[in-house]
Amino acid sequence: MTRIAEEAEVTRCLLLIETRLAWGPSEQWVNYDFEKLSDAIHEGTGVRLSVTTLKRIWGRLKYDSAPTLTTLNALAQFAGYNDWRTFKQNGDEVPEVVTEEMAIPTVASGPTVVKRSARYYWLLLLIPFGLLGYALIPAKKHVASYAIDSTRFSFRADKMITEGVPNSVVFHYDALASPTDSVYIAQTWDITRKKLVPKNKTEHSTIYYYPGYFRAKLIIDTTIVKTHDLWITSGGWLCLAEDDVVPLYFKKEECVKSDRVEVGEEILKKYNLSLHPKAPRIRIYNQGDLGDLMSDNFVFETTIKSDFNQGTNVCQPVEVLIQCKDDIIIIPFSAKPCIGDLFLAFCGAFVTSKEADLSKFGADLTQWTKLRIETVNRHATIYVNDQKAYSLTFPNTPTGIVGLQYRFNGVGAVKDTKFESNGRVIAF
């Protein structure tokens, strides 16, 4: 295959990934999006592609060399194919329509309604010319279309323990009615990270290492036939350091104090975790039953601090996440000089500092920083240190709130956390 044809195939694969992710045009992606993409590819394929590699492939960094076969195989697998060779042999067009089930609202970075850039359409025009070499190959006959009756399938999941992580889950499924061997289980909201399972079997097990509310799916070919809501709770406050496979869990008595929850340098030293050259990614969770607390009417308060502002963590990126059933709220913070690369998500409303003023989310995070969110009938007003930082009205249907997550680099602390709704106070 010529270099032009190979580049066209890479472009086709990237466009397929972009369309299925539904994060908006890649020209508007920020560093956060490439970090999430790196994590998603690793979880889905077992291959870790660095943020730098992904930025090079997407043309955000100059690099003259072609991607390695390992990289191409990982991209093809993430796009839903066995490997790069299989992807090239399949001449499917890049889909223009993204269904609600294909979209991934939790990490989208563009505005709710996105116009494609001119580059997108030029790349689409390039693909047929790059694939011209295939013109002499006899065309494959299309598989006859068929209807799938979802009532002929079953799907459920059983947790091994009631609360806490890690937690193994056994999926029970019946897919004998499938007209194809392409039977998949998607363990999370992201259907690009689906697992191929045997059509004639009935069980599939996996381990969840992080808390969360997951909408697992049984997929036949490209059709979602059954879903099952799976809630992995944290059992109160949970502190951990992220890792490529299994996170490092800190003991509760090490991080939960009488007046705060904190992962400090003394804990990191105990586990031989260094702040240099790159600080570990610290996560603090609290997920459990919050009753009838809903995303459209609540008041939330919390106070955060991150003392480490050296080396690669000079910008001190911090995120506060309110996790909902099949939805997410992400409030970003950074040091004041670094507010130019922030991303905010609020139940289907997505804002970046490239297109909005998020400067009020810049703070001296070495000091206690207060966050307050007031939401009334889907209109949210966000305050930082009692100053209005941003307001918006979110588009998604209101849903239940299931818990919290805090993201720090190196060290972090949380205190004075509570929800208020309908006269009820939930203190953590």
Image (tube, rainbow, N blue to C red):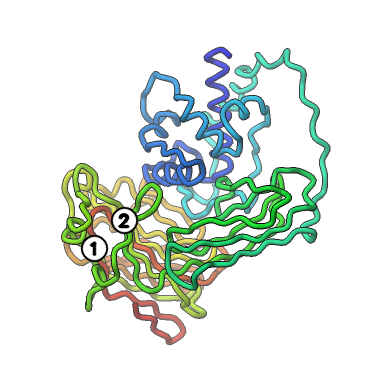
- Place of residue 229 in the rendered image (x, y in percent of width and height, measured from the top left): 59, 65
Q: Are marks 2 and 1 in contact (CB under 8 Å)?
A: yes
Instruction: State the image quarter where residue 392 is shown.
Output: bottom left
Q: Nearer the viewer, residue 400 or 211?
A: 211
Look at the numbered disc 1 and give the secondary structure of its residue: strand
From the image, which quarter does the C terminus lie in? bottom left
> What residue is rendered at 50% in x and 74% in y?
294
- The amino acid type, in three-letter code, at marker 1 is Val
248 relative to 294, above or below:
above
Residue position for label 1: 263
Q: Nearer the viewer, residue 326 or 220?
A: 220
Look at the numbered disc 2 and give the secondary structure of its residue: strand
- Marking on residue 92: none
- The amino acid type, in three-letter code, at marker 2 is Ala
Residue 105 can be seen in this image: yes
From the image, which quarter does the N terminus lie in? top right
Residue 333 as seen in the image, left or right of residue 46: left
- Place of residue 364 in the rendered image (x, y in percent of width and height, measured from the top left): 19, 58
- Place of residue 280 in the rendered image (x, y in percent of width and height, measured from the top left): 27, 50
Q: Earlier in the sequence, mark 2 or mark 1?
A: 2
Task: Calculate the distance from the C-alpha at mark 2 to the C-alpha at mark 1.
Answer: 10 Å
Q: Nearer the viewer, residue 351 or 135?
A: 135
Residue position for label 2: 241
> What residue is rendered at 34% in x and 56% in y?
332
Residue 386 can be seen in this image: no
Residue 306 as seen in the image, left or right of residue 319: left
Instruction: State the image quarter where residue 164 is shown.
Output: bottom left
> What residue is rendered at 29% in x and 70% in y?
252
342 relative to 117, above or below:
below
